[in-house]
Image (cartoon, grey):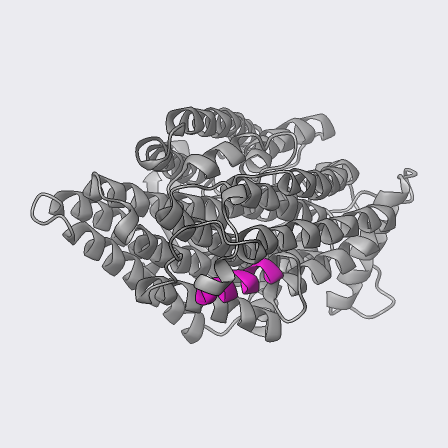
């Protein structure tokens, strides 16, 4: 029941914040802060009080209640290590978003915090739901409030950016809805049971052509949200026009829902089709890494620059997801968390500068290190994190991803490392243009105040902790990743000659499964094109 309360508190808090604005103009801020703080503490309690399973069942907490039983729809929520980490990130970023908007948002304050809390509620539902109809419901819940955050409280071209964001994400979401319905009817025709249950749909046998079509429906929504080149053009516009809190939520959380969808739905539901698509997906990842870095270097708008770094960093997510081994998938999870912190922090720095200068043009900045040293040190830490400096969290994420992708495809991994060099170039350009050039202002730039330091210091502590001691995060994510690898169905290598990339991935996956298996060494795991009709290892014990 605690999972339900996480969503209810955020939704009810949003409504209360909207209503309380009629009583006191500042009350919605405190309501939002209390709501997000409460769910953050509840999630932290879940992490500290639940021992992480070592295999067997990776699910920690479950809740299932029939919703529309005649259509096979249930209010089904479940928490494992992967979703637990994503929730901790969501509520941590949510707390920072409330604090960031404390001074920035001065109009329609109550409605702003209503939308902010409902975006967080939608994201929470996406990370928890185990019913595909409910998943699509929460996918839309987080879309509409985000549209208002950009369209009402954004900058000059906010309406254009909001419309573009809405069209891209809504159109791709409708393709996912069609794929969900297709999976629903195929499973019903095979078993006589029409259900949207994730655990039941895992056992659906799909013809190769149907699996490809349905997989692309899911991919459309997740690759646009991530985003992947060439579906990325909405992101720079949305970031540059959104308020600071909106940019932080976009970079820190909404992009992660796309990566989460790949891990949770695409890989387990369409195992054979994903193997076929893997070389192309990894190629798209490498293109995104290099292309995003090139565009980031050419930007003069600070927020657009940071937005293109997100395109580059999310390329590592695609690269790792389709490498199909534990190293790479652990790197993907770390990348989701560390990118949310480091890129979110850079957007916060951009927001602090905009409050003082009323411009995002880095050509009008320079020399701020001497007048705002605290801001300079904070910015330096996160710029170094962005370029992957050892000792900071992003280095661990990129290292694990590259090691895992090397086992799957050597050449694409080599090209991906070019992105690390380019990340150094655009990251150092940020520091040079803003903090180390000639000082161009008449008045000294005010340094960070107590509220701003309260926002920045926890983020610095988190990125240092993840870089120096990532083991708790890796241990939390491992059971979920290992269950996905165990449940994975591989195409038979001996029946059909595969391209070299797929051979490498199949061998890596087979070796990983042999290490995880409790069978004797001489018992080789069978390779089979068909999805097993037996109950999936991912299905938890029934519990409400």
Left or right: residue 530 compared with residue 176: right
Image quadrant of residue 41?
bottom left
Q: Residue furthest left?
A: 23
Q: Position of residue 450 (x, y in %)?
A: 32, 67
Q: Position of residue 20 (x, y in %)?
A: 12, 47
Q: Position of residue 101 (x, y in %)?
A: 31, 50
Choose between 415 and 225: the one closer to the eye.
Answer: 415
Image quadrant of residue 88?
bottom left
Does residue 109 appear in the picture of this structure? yes
Choose between 341 and 207: the one closer to the eye.
Answer: 341
State the residue at coordinates (39%, 53%): 352
Q: Position of residue 429 (x, y in %)?
A: 63, 51
Q: Which residues are magenta?
A: 372-385
Choose between 3 and 300: the one closer to the eye.
Answer: 300
Left or right: residue 394 compared with residue 361: right
Left or right: residue 505 compared with residue 188: right
């Amino acid at each position: 029941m605690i999972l339900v309360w996480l969503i209810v508190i955020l939704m009810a808090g949003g409504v209360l914040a909207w209503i309380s604005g009629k009583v006191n103009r500042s009350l919605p801020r405190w309501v939002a802060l209390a709501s997000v703080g409460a769910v953050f503490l509840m999630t932290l309690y879940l992490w500290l009080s639940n021992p992480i399973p070592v295999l067997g069942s990776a699910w920690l907490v479950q809740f299932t209640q029939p919703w529309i039983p005649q259509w096979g729809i249930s209010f089904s929520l479940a928490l494992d290590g992967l979703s637990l980490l994503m929730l901790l990130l969501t509520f941590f970023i949510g707390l920072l978003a409330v604090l960031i908007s404390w001074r920035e948002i001065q109009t329609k304050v109550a409605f702003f915090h209503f939308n902010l809390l409902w975006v967080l509620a939608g994201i929470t539902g996406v990370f928890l739901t185990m019913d595909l109809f409910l998943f699509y419901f929460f996918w839309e819940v987080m879309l509409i409030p985000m549209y208002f955050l950009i369209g009402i409280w954004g900058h000059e071209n906010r309406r254009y950016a909001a419309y573009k964001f809405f069209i891209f994400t809504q159109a791709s979401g409708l393709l996912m809805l069609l794929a969900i319905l297709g999976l629903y009817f195929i499973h019903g025709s095979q078993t006589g049971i029409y259900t949207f249950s994730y655990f039941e749909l895992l056992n659906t046998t799909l013809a190769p052509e149907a699996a490809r079509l349905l997989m692309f429906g899911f991919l459309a929504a997740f690759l646009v949200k991530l985003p992947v080149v060439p579906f990325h053009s909405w992101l720079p516009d949305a970031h540059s026009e959104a308020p600071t809190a909106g940019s932080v939520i976009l970079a820190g959380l909404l992009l992660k829902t796309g990566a989460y969808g790949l891990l949770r739905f695409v890989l387990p539901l369409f195992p054979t089709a994903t193997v076929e698509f893997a070389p192309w997906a990894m190629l798209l990842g490498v293109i995104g890494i290099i292309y995003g870095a090139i565009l980031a270097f050419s930007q003069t708008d600070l927020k657009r620059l940071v937005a293109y770094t997100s395109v580059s960093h999310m390329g590592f997510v695609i690269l790792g997801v389709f490498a199909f081994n534990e190293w790479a998938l652990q790197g993907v999870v770390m990348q989701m968390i560390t990118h949310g912190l480091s890129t979110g922090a850079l957007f916060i720095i951009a927001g602090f500068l905009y409050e003082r200068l009323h411009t995002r043009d880095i050509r009008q900045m320079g020399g701020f290190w001497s007048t705002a040293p605290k801001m300079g040190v904070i910015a330096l830490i996160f710029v170094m994190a962005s370029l992957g400096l050892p000792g900071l969290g992003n280095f661990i994420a990129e290292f694990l991803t590259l090691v895992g992708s090397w086992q799957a495809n050597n050449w694409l991994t080599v090209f991906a490392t070019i992105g690390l060099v380019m990340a150094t170039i655009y990251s150092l350009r940020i520091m040079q243009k803003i903090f180390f050039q000639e000082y161009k202002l008449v008045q000294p730039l005010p340094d960070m105040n107590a509220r701003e330091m309260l926002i920045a210091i926890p983020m610095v502590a988190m990125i240092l902790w993840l870089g120096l001691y990532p083991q708790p995060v890796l241990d939390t994510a491992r059971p979920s990743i290992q269950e996905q690898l165990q449940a994975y169905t591989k195409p038979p290598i001996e029946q059909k000659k595969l391209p070299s990339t797929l051979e490498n991935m199949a061998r890596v996956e087979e070796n990983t499964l042999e290490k995880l298996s409790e069978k004797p060494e001489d018992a080789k795991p069978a390779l089979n094109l068909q999805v097993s009709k037996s109950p999936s290892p991912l299905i938890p014990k029934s519990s409400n």
